């Protein structure tokens, strides 16, 4: 698929999240041991979350979807898959009511 690179979306999302007072976000990197990591780990005012970033038209893998579901159900984390900064902004502000 042509168009925007996933790394470009990551950077925009990280910059925006880290500009929000009370929010800290970090890019997570995969492991050579096959441990599934989602793209961005964040904490906002003591609330934990994960963001999986995909290019427009792409979807999380089954393992990524399972990982997001596991974190959300077992730990109450906010987990979302986004395809743009605008989508992240909408989801974040809706979920955290800001």
Image (cartoon, rainbow, N blue to C red):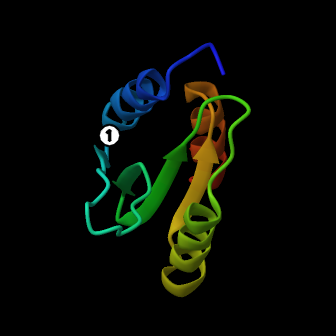
**Residue under the image location 43 percent in, 21 percent down:** 8
Image quadrant assignment for residue 19: top left
Instruction: Classify residue 16 by image quadrant.
Output: top left
> In which quarter of the view is residue 43 placed?
bottom left
The N terminus, quarter of image: top right
Which residue lies at the image location 62% right of the left edge and 57% below the top edge?
Answer: 61
Q: Position of residue 68 (x, y in %)?
A: 56, 67
Task: Let me know if residue 97 appears in the view.
Answer: no
Q: Residue furthest top?
A: 3
Dot 1, crowdedness within 10 Å: few (<14), some or many (≥20)?
few
Q: Residue at x 32, y 55 (%)?
A: 30
Query: Which residue is outermost to the bottom?
Result: 74
Location of residue 57 in the rendering, given as x and y in whole percent from the top left corner: 74, 32
Left or right relative to 71: residue 48: left
State the residue in front, 15 or 11.
Answer: 11
Viewer-proximal residue, 1 or 10?
1
Q: Work out whether 53 lies above or below 19.
A: below
- Which quadrant holds the C terminus? top right
Residue drawn at the location 53% of the way across and 86% of the way down? 74
Which residue is nearer to you in this view: 81 or 57?
A: 57
- Looking at the image, is 38 positioned above or below residue 18? below
Check disc 1 and report its element: helix, strand or loop. Answer: loop
In this rendering, the count of numbered labels is: 1
User: Looking at the image, is 35 positioned above or below residue 20?
Assistant: below
| Whether residue 63 is situated above or below residue 21 in the rendered picture | below
Using residue 87 as the reference point, say whether residue 44 is left or right of it. Answer: left
Of 96 and 89, the residue lying toward us: 89
Image location of residue 58, percent across then percent down: 68, 38
Query: Badge 1 is on which residue?
Result: 21
Residue 14: tell me if it is visible.
Answer: yes
């Amino acid at each position: 698929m042509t168009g925007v690179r996933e790394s470009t979306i990551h950077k925009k999302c990280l910059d925006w999240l880290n500009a929000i007072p009370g929010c800290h976000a970090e890019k997570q990197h995969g492991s050579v041991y096959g441990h599934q990591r989602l793209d961005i780990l964040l904490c906002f005012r003591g609330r934990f979350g994960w963001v999986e970033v995909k290019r427009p038209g792409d979807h999380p893998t089954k393992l990524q979807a399972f990982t997001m579901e596991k974190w959300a159900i077992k730990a109450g984390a906010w987990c979302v898959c986004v395809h743009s900064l605008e989508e992240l902004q909408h989801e974040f502000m809706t979920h955290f009511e800001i």
